[in-house]
Structure formats: C-alpha cells, structure tokens
C-alpha cells in the first residue's frame, strides 16, 4: 500500500501517517440478504472503537459500510449473535443494536446501563438476551413485539465481572457464568427481575463459570469452565441440582460467541473460507462442487491502536499495534513504512545494544528481535524465529507495563499485572548471556501490588520500582496505596518500600538521572524527584496529565542528555537544577503514547498515528551530571 509522505503540521510537529492502516473484525457471520444472495457481515473495529458493520456480497465482492447508529466511544463488540430470524445483534458502549441483513440497515438500537455484552443468547421465544461487563447488566429484546427491557445491574461484586457464557432454559429462566476473580453461576428470573447466585462460596474459584443449553430444555453448568472434576449442575426453573454424571452435551444450536465469532456456513450451502481485513480478500467455496472463488473488497479505516514505540538499533522507529496485532517499522531517512503480523500484542518495547526487545500480552512473553537479520515469524518452539520467543511467565506476568533494558547490557527486567482474575504481578529477570530467567512473585515483592515502573540504580546494584494497585483484568483490587521500593539485584530481595505519596494508586513512570536523583510521576499528574540514598522526596509539583499507555514511556532523553516529558497536551523540558518544567510546544493532537528520540526528533503516537516533534537546538541542554 502506497503511503502519503510525511506532512509538516507547523510549530515543529510532523505527521508520519497511520502505523497499521487496517481494521480488526469483532465477529463475522455468513448469512443471506433480502434476495437470498450470500452475504458476509463483519463488525469493524479500529482506533475509534466499533465504528461500523461491513456487509459484503459474497457473489460479487461488493461491500457496503453501515456506520453504527451510536458513537462507539472507543468501545467495541465483545459478543454478538445471529438469530434464528436472521438478525445480527451486538451490545457495546452501553447500546444494544439490531441489524437486519434483509433490509440492509440497522433496525433497532437502545441505550442501556453500562457497558458491553460478554455473552448473548436467544431463548425459545426468540427473544435476544445480553449480559454485560462490568456489573452483570441484563437486557432483553423481543424481535416480534419490539419490546426492549433493560433490567439493570443484577449482581454486584467489588471487581469487574466477565459473563462469557449465557443460556436460557425452556421455562424462560436465564443463566450465566461469571469470572474471573471468583466464579459464580447466576440464575435470573425475568418475571420477578431478580438474580440469585447458585454456587456455594467454597466452590468458587479463579476463572469463569460455564453454562450451556441442552436440547432437553435444561441448562447445565460448571463451577469452572474446563474443569469437570468438581461436578456438573443441572439448572432448571432457577434451581441448581448437582449431578453425578456428565450431561448429554447436546447443545441447542446458537450462532453466538465472543469477538472471535466466525460463522462460515451460508444458507445456500456454500462456505466462507476466509475474510481477511488486512489483505481485503474474501474466499468462498462450494463444498458440493469443489469450486472456490475469491473477491477483493474495501472499507474505510482509521487504523489500529498504536501501543508504543522505541528507536531500534537500525535507526528506525518500531513498535506494535492492536487490534489487529501488527509490527510496524518507520524509516525516517527514506520516509517509508514496513508492516507485518506480530506475535500477539507488543505492550512494551525497549532497545539493548544491537537488539530490540518486546514484552507482550497475553501471557506475559518476551521476544528478542535482531533488525540486522531477516524477519522470520515468531513461533514458541522455533529457535530460528526473528523475533525470537524467549519465554512466557503466566499468570504472574500477563499484561506487561515496563521493560527495563538494564545498563549492564545483559539483563532485561519485565514487570506486569497478572492474568485475568488475579491480583499482584511478578517481576521477570532475563539473563541474555546465560539464556535463563528468574521470576519473582508479587509475594516476593509487595503482596497484592504490581510493578508499573522501574529504573536501575547501577552504582548500588539495585532497582527502584514504583507499583500500581490495579489488579489483573477482572481481578479484585486489594492494595490501598501504591508504593516505591528498592530491590537488591544480587539477592533479588526488597530492601525498602514505602507508600511515599498518600493515596497514590500508581507510579506511572520513573527516570534515572543520577545517583541522588530519580524523576517520576504519580497518577500521571504529580511530578517528583526522589533521592535513593536518603529515600526522600526532594521535590514535587502538580502538573498536567502525562501521556499514557500500557507501557507509557513518559520520559524521553535526547543525545545530549536533555530530558523531556510527554504530556497529553504537549512536550516539555526539565531544567536539571531547579526542576522547572518548561512547556516547549503544545501538540496539535493528544499525545497518547511515548516515545523516543532519533536524529533531533521526539517520536510519539496519537491513536493510530505516528508523529514527531523537531527539537529546537536552543532547548537542548547539557547532560545531567
């Protein structure tokens, strides 16, 4: 794809383009239109959220984009269902919506309590049900009467719930399994508008409960999906009965799933082989004749969300996007782009020597990329991959927030929040020379905390870490205040920790300036200077909000040692003697993620776009001593 050239925005800012100029699917179904022609429906998701439904005529390749009838608000489908009446439903950004492929338009939408359906189903009366994150909101739509009922939040916990499995019995009761901090089976009675938990507390575990509707009219459930050892429950008319043997497993057909829904079978008997939004390519086959054909289609896109970026050893700007999960490489010298499928989501990136490293989600993995060698797609067990898969440390490391390339040139330290439903993240040490790892659990560090930011105090052979109280996704928050801590590198032990700022929830980023000076931000808006020797705050001030991402990279240092801060609204410089923060330029777009320096420019992202700021030489000072 030919890219437009870099555009000057004035005042030193430049726009380099969209890193990954494609959208991601959030549910694909093969169906038919009003003339019984094969039709493909695709929920489109880009940096804006779920912005449209794409309908593609499978016989001609002609595509029509149907904008969502409500603002996506950065949210997108996490579940959808194609009903027995051939209507396509989803529920996100607190809106329930119906699309009619026969009419070729959205025919119903309604605002609801927050926020997005994690599971949907159709009952025996043809009514469509959705159950929503984060507080188990229940909604029901009757396609015949056009009546919509928002039952509100029916089951509350002190953590955000996922409801991936939803089913209704033939008497009209609704059941759903929740996760992930503590599983539970919920029975909901539409007549009384009440919900009741069915599992005893002793049977709740970390993970999600599971339900399915059987052809016998009943629903069957498990305390934990995939774990049958604890036994099955028969769920009927709101009652739960434990059964000694496995149920019939004759699931009543429903075309519904998470955002990965891909229903391939057309009513005509043909089959959707693939629908590739990256290549904009549709492949359909007829199993009866063996015939297969391909169509090219197009759609509009603002591009995938840019996670973060850093300068690579080959003097290019590299990083990852989501969704889809892609690698990008921008070469400022030639003003050209490279874009490839990446191994999952590149949450945080860093350079060490002649290599580029990645801490990724899901699963908390570490990759090593050599830009000087040919790209070979990453596989877990392939030692020839480039990027090379080094390891994975789930559930302690799951959604990385900081990747520290230690100044010793051989050690990498990866910090993270834990897996879904867990609280307290680990710290991973990777030794490049020996190819070995050491994992510290949160109980070895600060129990119930995760490390958000890290710097090396090389002269002390210590790390200074800043924590976050945030749990893993869908987990329970247990710590009340974030803390700073010092860790001895040799013993891998915490030698000091303290909640330096009362009520702080996160140490957003840290930067090592000298033996007696570490800069940092608390909760994005409090700048501070910390002396590791005295373990005291020597300066603090309130500021604007910093940029923010899962790996923020708020501080950017130039080749002369001048330190810059990426605020959401602009770029500032730190005066090393007075600690004064001087705003150099207001950005023409919100700065979302940092950030690195290359050839006189600070590179950053906003949404799906890559930008840079040309630093004026008069704003660059001497290196910190």
Image: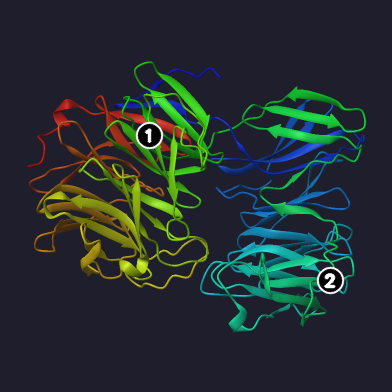
Which of the pair 96/515 is nearer the observer? 515
Q: CA distance from mark 2 to mark 1?
A: 55 Å
Q: Quadrant of residue 303?
A: top right
Residue 588 - label: 1
Q: Quadrant of residue 62?
A: top right
Q: Quadrant of residue 527?
A: bottom left
Q: Nearer the viewer, mark 2 or mark 1?
A: 2
Apparent side of residue 553 relative to residue 75 in the rendered image (left or right): left
Whether pointer 2 and pointer 1 mark residues with C-beta atoms closer than 8 Å, the reply is no
If you read the primary sequence from the N terminus, does the residue marked by circle 2 or circle 1 appear first? 2
Apparent side of residue 484 relative to residue 474 in the rendered image (left or right): left
Q: How is the image coloured?
A: rainbow
Q: Residues within 10 Å of mark 1 (few under 14, many from 20)?
A: some
> What secondary structure is marked by label 2?
loop
Residue 20 - label: none
Res. 113 visible in picture: no
Apparent side of residue 555 relative to residue 362 in the rendered image (left or right): left
Residue at left offset 87%, top offset 35%: 270
The spot of residue 568 in percent (x, y) is 35, 44
Which of the pair 122/278 is nearer the observer? 278
Residue, disc 2: 169
The spot of residue 370 in percent (x, y) is 37, 30
> What secondary structure is marked by label 1?
loop
Residue projecting furthest to the front: 434
Apparent side of residue 359 relative to residue 351 in the rendered image (left or right): right
The spot of residue 402 in percent (x, y) is 34, 50
């Amino acid at each position: 794809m030919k890219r437009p050239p870099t555009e000057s925005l004035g005042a030193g800012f430049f726009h380099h383009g969209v890193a990954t100029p494609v959208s991601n699917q959030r549910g694909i179904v093969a169906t038919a239109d009003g003339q019984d022609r094969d039709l493909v429906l695709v929920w489109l998701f880009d940096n804006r959220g779920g912005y449209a439904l794409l309908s593609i005529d499978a016989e001609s390749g002609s595509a029509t984009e149907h904008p969502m009838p409500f603002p996506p608000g950065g949210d997108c489908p996490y579940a959808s269902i194609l009903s027995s009446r051939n209507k396509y439903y989803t529920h996100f950004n607190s809106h329930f919506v119906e699309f009619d492929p026969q009419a070729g338009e959205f025919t119903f939408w309604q605002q609801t309590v927050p926020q997005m359906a994690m599971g949907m189903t159709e009952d025996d009366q043809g009514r469509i049900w959705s159950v929503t994150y984060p507080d188990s909101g229940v909604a029901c739509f009757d396609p015949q009467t056009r009546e919509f009922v928002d039952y509100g939040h029916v089951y509350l916990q002190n953590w955000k719930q996922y409801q991936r499995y939803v089913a209704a019995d033939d008497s009209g009761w609704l059941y759903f399994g929740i996760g992930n901090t503590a599983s539970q089976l919920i029975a909901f009675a539409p007549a009384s508008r009440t919900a009741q938990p069915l599992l005893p507390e002793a049977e709740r575990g970390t993970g999600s409960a599971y339900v399915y509707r059987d052809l016998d009219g009943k629903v069957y459930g498990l305390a934990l999906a995939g774990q049958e050892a604890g036994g099955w429950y028969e769920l009927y008319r709101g009652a739960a009965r434990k059964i000694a043997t496995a149920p019939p497993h004759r699931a009543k057909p429903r075309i519904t799933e998470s955002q990965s829904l891909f229903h391939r079978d057309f009513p005509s008997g043909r089959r959707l082989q693939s629908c590739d939004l990256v290549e904009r390519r549709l492949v359909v086959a007829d199993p009866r004749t063996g015939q297969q054909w391909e169509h090219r289609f197009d759609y509009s896109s603002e591009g995938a969300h840019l996670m973060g970026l850093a300068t690579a050893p080959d003097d290019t700007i590299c990083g990852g996007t989501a969704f889809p999960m892609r690698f990008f490489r921008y070469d400022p010298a030639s003003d050209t782009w490279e874009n490839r499928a990446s191994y999952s989501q590149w949450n945080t990136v860093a350079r060490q020597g002649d290599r580029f490293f990645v801490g990724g989600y899901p699963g908390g993995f570490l990759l090593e990329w050599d830009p000087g060698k040919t790209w070979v797609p990453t596989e877990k067990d392939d030692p020839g991959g480039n990027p090379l898969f080094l390891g994975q440390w789930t559930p302690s490391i799951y959604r990385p927030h900081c990747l520290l390339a230690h100044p010793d040139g051989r050690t990498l330290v990866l910090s993270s929040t834990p897996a879904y439903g867990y609280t307290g993240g680990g710290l991973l040490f990777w030794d490049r020379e020996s190819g070995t790892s050491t994992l510290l659990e949160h109980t070895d560090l600060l129990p119930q905390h995760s490390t958000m930011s890290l710097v090396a105090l090389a002269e002390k052979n210590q790390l200074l870490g800043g924590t976050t109280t945030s749990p893993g996704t869908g987990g329970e928050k247990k710590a009340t205040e974030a803390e700073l801590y010092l860790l001895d590198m040799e013993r891998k032990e915490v030698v000091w920790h303290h909640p330096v700022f009362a009520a702080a929830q996160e140490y957003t980023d840290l930067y090592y300036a000298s033996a007696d000076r570490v800069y940092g931000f608390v909760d994005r808006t409090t700048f501070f200077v910390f002396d590791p020797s005295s373990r005291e705050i020597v300066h603090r001030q309130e500021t604007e909000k910093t940029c923010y991402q899962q790996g923020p990279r708020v501080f950017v240092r130039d080749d002369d040692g001048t330190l810059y801060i990426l605020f959401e609204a602009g770029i500032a410089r730190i005066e090393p003697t007075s600690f004064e923060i001087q705003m150099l330029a207001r950005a023409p777009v919100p700065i979302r993620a940092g950030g690195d320096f290359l050839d006189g420019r600070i590179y950053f992202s906003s949404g799906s776009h890559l930008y840079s700021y040309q630093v004026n030489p008069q704003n660059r000072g001497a290196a910190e001593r």
